[in-house]
Image (spheres, grey):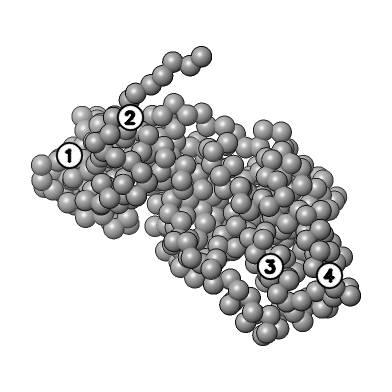
Amino acid sequence: MLSLSMDRNKAIATLLRKERESLKYTLKDVSQGMGFSNYQTLSSIESGEREIKAWELARLAELYGKRIDYFLSEQTEISQPKVLWRDPAKTENKTETERKFISFCLNYKRLLGLTTEENIKLPYNIQPDKTEFKRGGFEYTVELAEELRRTLNLGGRPAYSLSNVLEQVFNILVLYMDLGMVCSGASTSGDFGKAILVNSSDAPWRRNYDLAHELFHLITWDIFSDEEIYPKTEKGKSEVEQWADAFASALLLPSEEVRREFSKRLEDNKITYISLIEIAQEFKVSIEALLWRLVNLNLLKRNVVNQLINEEQLKDINKKMRVTDWADEKPYLSSRYITLAIKALQAGKISKLKFAEYIDKPFSEVSSFLRKYGYDENEDYSVAFAAA
């Protein structure tokens, strides 16, 4: 057991109960995860009647997505990994969502360790300079986006490969969660690595844009303070957030490629609504993002775009033409995360019960989940061949 005073044991017990309730876990849920034969054991721990054992505290901290020193600290709160939200003032149920996000990040790090995968840092040769941002502003931001696109070999249609490159090459967790209509995404960086959270309820083109926007925050993580990102003013977006938007636009809409596609569709120096929407579809971005990118490339005039943005006919055509873009089901977690979890399960590194916890599914759904991703529990995957 831990050597604790009665007061400290009581404080830890209270904190454990508070964390469990904040995550909406029942005594039965956690007791099963702990391997207790009944929930009375956990109940006695939370009431302070029974002193908690070291392994129990470590396991509970893991289940709640907390570091163990969070519970052992003399203070009730310690520094947690920072999460940058797109609009923190409007984020509903932020605490619960944030803890779930961090919990997935910690699980991702464990899976990387269990499967002996390397957690590579991003970016490996991109070093943004705050002075250059202040001096060059949007021009420097666009140059940064172009440099990163070339470095990551994203090609002429970056939206098609960005998520996979971040996951497969750099082990960045790209997590999709239903955030409702309020918040579009977030990013974080900690001991577990870097991660991006995207609202799975948003339109596919919006998710691509938010992914690129949050990537900006990850590569400038140590440059800007919270106050610079979220100034306490009523003047709209901060300068940093405007740079993040410009970065996302330049990254997803490479200038040469956009110019080529725009020029191809010009007739008598005019372009139709359908042609504009086709370009937006081709690059997997919103029509609004494309239009403002065309303004920045001097291909359309600002006053024209201001009118187009509110044009009902354009909105109606866009809505009808992009129905098929919604055909795919909402993304869940990330393909990389799920692949690592299945790999750990297949190698016997984790149990099916732990696997269920990692993928945030009931144990009863594990078998059907595995079949969905092409994994047969009765198949022998241990066969290996010697390399030449």
Please report the residue visible at 38 percent of the width from the left and 29 percent of the height from the top.
114
Whole-percent x, y for residue 309 in the image? 71, 78
Label 1 to label 4, Cα distance in Å? 67 Å
* Residue at the spot of label 4: 266
Circle 3 residues within 10 Å: few <14, some 14–19, many ≥20: some
Whole-percent x, y for residue 173 in the image? 50, 44
Q: Is residue 325 left or right of residue 332?
A: right
Question: Which of disc 3 and disc 4 is earlier in sequence?
Answer: 4
Query: What amino acid does circle 4 point to?
Result: Leu
Label 3 to label 1, Cα distance in Å? 55 Å
User: Which mark is nearer the camera, 1 or 2?
Assistant: 2
Circles 4 and 2 in contact, beta carbons < 8 Å: no
Question: Which of disc 3 and disc 2 is earlier in sequence?
Answer: 3
User: In this rendering, is residue 242 above or below 217?
Assistant: below
Secondary structure type for disc 3:
helix
User: Which mark is nearer the camera, 3 or 1?
Assistant: 3
Question: Which of disc 1 and disc 3 is earlier in sequence?
Answer: 1
* Residue at the spot of label 2: 381
Query: What amino acid does circle 1 point to?
Result: Gly
**Is 122 in front, or is 314?**
314
Query: What amino acid does circle 3 point to?
Result: Glu
Whole-percent x, y for residue 310 in the image? 70, 82
Secondary structure type for disc 1:
loop
* Residue at the spot of label 1: 35
* Residue at the spot of label 3: 278
Please report the residue visible at 67 percent of the width from the left and 40 percent of the height from the top.
152
